[in-house]
Amino acid sequence: MHSASSPGPINVRYSGVFTTDFHSPARSQSGDHCAASVPAFPTRQCPSLSLAELRPPVRLVREFIWPPEQCKLEGIPNRNYHARGPITGRNMRQYFASLLLMTSLLLLPVSAQAVDEPQALRLLTSALDQVNDPVQQTALLRGMLAGLAGRRDVTPPDAWAALAARLGKSENAQVRELTSQLSEVFGDESATQRALSMIQDRSADVADRRRALYSLLQLKNKQVSSLLLPLLDEEALRMDAIRGYAAIENPQAAKLLLERYPKLPMESRKAILETLATRKPYAQALLRAIKAKQVPRADIPTHVARSLRFLLGDDFVSVFGDVRQLSQDRESQIKKYKQLLTPTALADGDAARGRAIYNKTCASCHTLYGAGGKIGPDLTGSNRANLDYILLNSVDPSYDVPEGYKMVIIQTVDGRVLNGVIAEENAQNVVLKTVEQPRVVVLKKDIEVRRISPKSMMPDGQLDQMKPQDVINLIKYLQTIEQVEVAE
């Protein structure tokens, strides 16, 4: 319920889109609603948009929901904002186009007259040209970049060149950087050359170099491939370089990565294995390394083995053996672990050590007590006190996979293979959450094969790889009702 009095208007940035005439949140009991002027529009089948009924004086409005993890990434408040009423006329069309871009719904018809991509870009460019506040400029630029994520060969609006020249002289570094990134999307060669120079400049800020690298990898820029090798020797950018070889194929990549494999820390070795499981030539080189015992078989995680099996088929099985399938006797497996996990054994278990095991084996995919990955279900509110529930989902994670967590395998036209769950999807893009990356944007026109696997992303047989005491400690931790300190 909004209060009768309202403080003066303030500018609020939300999910890369700014609107004017925001008012400070008038707190309801939950304190998560804010009245604002944003456009109203007809309901559409879109996971990011829904109807919301608020009490007077707020009318029937539309609700824009952005994933909490993206809020954290963008550094914005994790809350929902509700429209007090529609903006009309020209402003409504501008802000509406911004909202479409932000949610990657560029071609979604919203009335009898559709807002198509060129028109949306013209409207946004016009809106951007009329503001001078760096906060507002940054918000609109972020919205445009988010809406065009993964896109290549986008035709710029006629007014973009002049606007980019002006914004490129801004005193605000973020405005300059975002303008340059958007110019890259629009095919501006000078912006691309600046990004290439930034990647090579060791005196530049690491975050700026990383953004430049990510931007060019998204655009499949072939020139960036030759810049990845020196980055392998820079600790701050090594992981980015390793994953860069997955985005852009390089005939020397497998040799370069495998030569460095034994000397690198565990996190980098894991990233190398994941990268080598994305393309057939890479996978063949990795298989030869496994056969020669250059890479121990035990190093290969199940999700990597599945990708290798998809790429290489029986050639992989002949060297590695088949990827472990579900035991036909699930009940006997559960019975075996119940005999180990007696009330006495669990009472003597060490939850702190269990948390350390959880962090190593589970946290990259699952959230517990507010921390962890988003690929699998949040475990905080699950039936963790029930030992049968825990064992069923650990012994046979594919027994009952919720619809939103089924593994999707995508092979692109350039031969890259990705495994993950669908985070977002619209008419142009699929966004995957993978074990190694929370957001991988794939253009639908780049997809050659797309399959839904009956298997869970969670590997079978994880408990089988642990020592009995580690299993006890892990289950002890999973059954806690509040967070515990992690063991050193």
Image: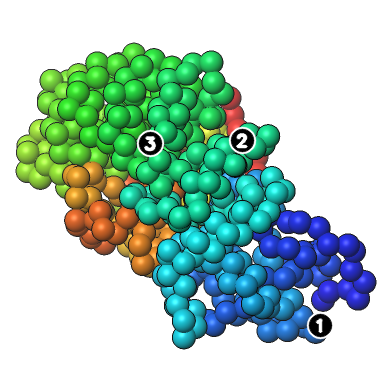
Give the percent coordinates (x, y) of residue 26: 84, 67
Question: Taking the image as drawn, is residue 460 in sight?
Answer: no
- Observer-side mark, 2 or 1, equals 2
Which residue corresponds to the image point at 62% horizontal and 72% vertical from the top-left? 90
Picture coordinates of residue 183 (x, y %)? 46, 43
Q: How far apart are marks 1 and 3 (CA)?
A: 51 Å
- What label sits on residue 57 in the rendered view? 1
Label 2 secondary element: loop
User: Label 3 neighbourhood size at 10 Å, few (<14), some (14-19), many (20+)?
Assistant: few
Which structural element holds mark 3?
helix
Tags 1 and 3 touching, CB below 8 Å: no
Q: Which residue lies furthest to the right in this view?
A: 5
Image quarter of the N terminus: bottom right
**Which amino acid lies under the numbered mark 2 shown in the image of this protein?**
Lys
Q: What element carries label 1?
A: loop
Q: 99 or 240: nearer the eye?
A: 99
The foreground one among 341 and 99 is 99
Residue 197 x, y percent position in the rendering: 43, 23
Please identify the quarter of the rendering in which residue 301 is found.
top left
The type of residue carrying mark 3 is Glu
Picture colour scheme: rainbow
Mark 2 sits on what residue? 169
Residue 425 in sight from this viewpoint? yes
Measuring 15% from the left and 44% from the top, which residue is drawn there?
311
Residue under circle 3? 189
In 3D space, how far apart are the residues under numbered discs 3 and 2 (Cα atoms)? 18 Å
What's the residue at 81%, 58% (across, down)?
A: 10
Query: What is the three-letter code of the residue carrying label 1?
Result: Pro
